[in-house]
Image (cartoon, grey):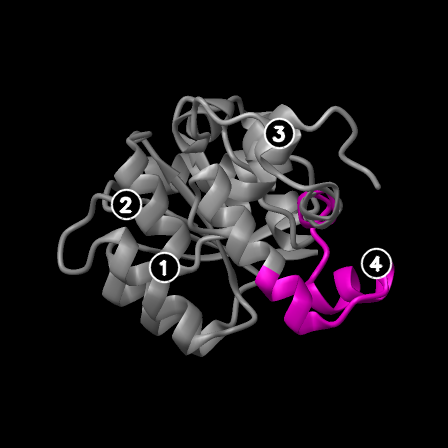
Amino acid sequence: MIRALVVDDHAMVREGLAVVLAADGDIAVIGTAANGEEARDRAAAERPDVVVMDLSMPVMDGIRATRAVREASPDTRVLVLTSFAERESVQRALEAGATGYQLKDAEPDQLRAAVRAVHAGHAPLDPRVAAVLLPSGRGADVLSEREKDVLRLVAEGRANKQIATALGISERTVKAHLGNIFKEIGVSDRTSAALWARDRLDDPRP
């Protein structure tokens, strides 16, 4: 059972989300919060598996709340659910520690699937959100074959240690490759790099 906390400043939205999330029986909404401070306090006290987080709220907004929740309960993952798909909002949320980012017009099945994906450690992004993160104008030919190998493994969700083991190189070398990759393709984080890889590398697996 996935234990979820719903955070939104509108009571009707909170109640509606609680019903939607619980529909399949594998997600239990253990509580709700109307702002970021409440979310932080409830996360610290109840340690939910997933927090479904709005961004635009009074007292403490969703960006600050995401960071606060992650600090208060490091094992809790945050799924942003908002109306905003602007690049800056998405990047700030991911930098604050959000694992996934969905829009409020998502279908109920999509939202439940996103909660499950976040709980499993994946990074579900609405396609419209992914589109604003993908840099344009850079093709795969800017990377060396080894850099492409590293990037394919990043796209699979592998950690640096796992990449190093798979390729027979050191973690320090992996980090150096990632620094070059980020610079070459114009991204600043692993999620954006993985999205870039899925869009531009023909085969995401080594």
Q: Is residue 31 above or below residue 103?
A: below
* Of callouts 2 and 1, the N-terminal one: 2
Relative vertical location of residue 133 with respect to residue 45 in this rendering, above or below: above
The image position of residue 113, as x and y in percent, is: 64, 35
Q: Mark 2 points at which residue?
A: 55
Q: Which of marks 1 and 3 is in front?
A: 3
Identified at 30% across, 61% down, the residue is 65
Q: Residue drawn 72% across and 56% down?
A: 158
Q: Is mark 2 on a helix, strand or loop?
A: loop
Question: Do residues under tags 3 and 2 come within 8 Å of each other at their CB atoms?
Answer: no
Amino acid tagged 3? Ala
Q: Mark 4 points at which residue?
A: 167
Q: Which of 205 and 28 is in front in this view?
A: 205
Q: Position of residue 103 (x, y in %)?
A: 40, 29
- The amino acid sitting under disc 1 is Ala
The answer for how far apart the CA atoms under marks 3 and 2 are is 34 Å
- Does residue 36 appear left or right of residue 155 in this picture? left
Circle nearer the N terminus (4, 2): 2
Q: Which of marks 1 and 4 is nearer the N terminus?
A: 1
Residue 26 percent coordinates (x, y): 70, 47
**Element type at mark 1:** helix
Q: How far apart are marks 3 and 4 (CA)?
A: 19 Å
Looking at the image, which residue is at 79% across and 29% down? 203
